[in-house]
Image: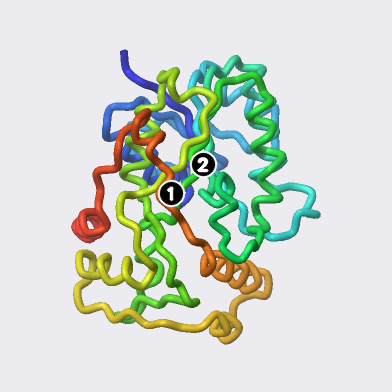
Amino acid sequence: MQKTITIIGATGQLGRKVARKLDSKGVQVTAVVRDAASARTILPKSIQLIEADVSDKESLVSALAGTKTLYITLNTTSLDPSLPFHTEREGVINIVEAAKVTDVKHIMQIAGIDYLHPEFADKGLEYKTNVIRIPGIEAIKNSGINFTFFFCSFFLDSFPTFIENGQFAIIGDHVHPIYYTNTTDLAEMIGNAIGNEMAYNQSFSVQGTEGMSLPEAAKKFVEGYSPGTEIVLHPIATIAEMGLPEEQAVFMEHMLTYVEQLKEQPVSQKTWQVLGKPKTTITDFARDLSSTS
């Protein structure tokens, strides 16, 4: 029987890649989007599009009719918990309420590995967006619907955004190892979780097999993606000189300061036993990305 999944957040930078990879593996993918015309320019024709908005619970009830497995991939880019609406808070709560009405059997969601393993924060810093995520995550856990959380390490998919004018810019002093993941391996795990009772009501750490610092990983990545790219190190203070809007600059400084002190450990053995071991190395991913870009 063909596997099916509905994705909320399929037009995001990570969501679109996961959607495409699941689709290419023969999974029947439906994407819930705000603007179908815009989404069609991003997603293949084989992915069904249904319009709804996470701020509108009634539209979600209509969109999720017939859904059995739901994957949520949303993102918080504000540090202000006082805002009246966050997609990862009120939006997820609305999704859960709609999922109850439509008899969804399984909800999956992505978040950062730091949420599951706060002990990785070597200096005890708190990642402020996690405070915003908590109500949404708790709503899923308390919904009575089977859940699977993927708490992911740093995505290699973001590396090309650090490259400009022949330079890979690293901001901050990053010396601790990170076990980088990627959307290729994540999509494989999501596919393996569909209809898999061993994945129900579980929280999985998602990491790659190679642990190295950001400068080390950047060197390996550019060798496969864009040989000759120079790796340039900048202090955190550089953010103040970039001319970014204040809110964006504050968010970036907080995020990079937090990542600086993350001391990640390999903790994904349970994930690999249930959902499969990652097969994609940093070099493999870089070369694949280079050949398709």
Using the image, tell me which numbered label, if any, was put on residue 110: 2
Q: Is residue 267 left or right of residue 280?
A: right
Residue occupying the point 40% across, 77% down? 169
Q: Is residue 88 left or right of residue 111?
A: right
Residue occupying the point 42% across, 76% down? 170
Taking depth in this image into account, of 79 and 33 the one nearest to the observer is 79
Location of residue 106 in the rendering, given as x and y in whole percent from the top left corner: 52, 22
Q: Is residue 103 visible?
A: yes
Mark earlier in primary sequence (1, 2):
1
Residue occupying the point 25% across, 48% down? 280
Check whether the beta carbons of the residues at disc 1 and disc 2 lie within 8 A of each other: yes
Quadrant of the drawing holding the N terminus? top left
Location of residue 111 in the rendering, given as x and y in whole percent from the top left corner: 54, 45
Q: Is residue 88 left or right of residue 169?
A: right
Q: Residues within 10 Å of mark 2 (few under 14, many from 20)?
A: many
Residue 19 vertical position relative to residue 168 in the rendered view, above or below: above
Q: Is residue 32 visible?
A: no
Q: How is the image coloured?
A: rainbow
The amino acid pointed to by label 1 is: Leu
Cα separation between marks 1 and 2: 10 Å
Snapshot quadrant of residue 245: bottom right
Residue topped by disc 1:
14
The amino acid pointed to by label 2 is: Ile
Location of residue 149 in the rendering, given as x and y in whole percent from the top left corner: 52, 35
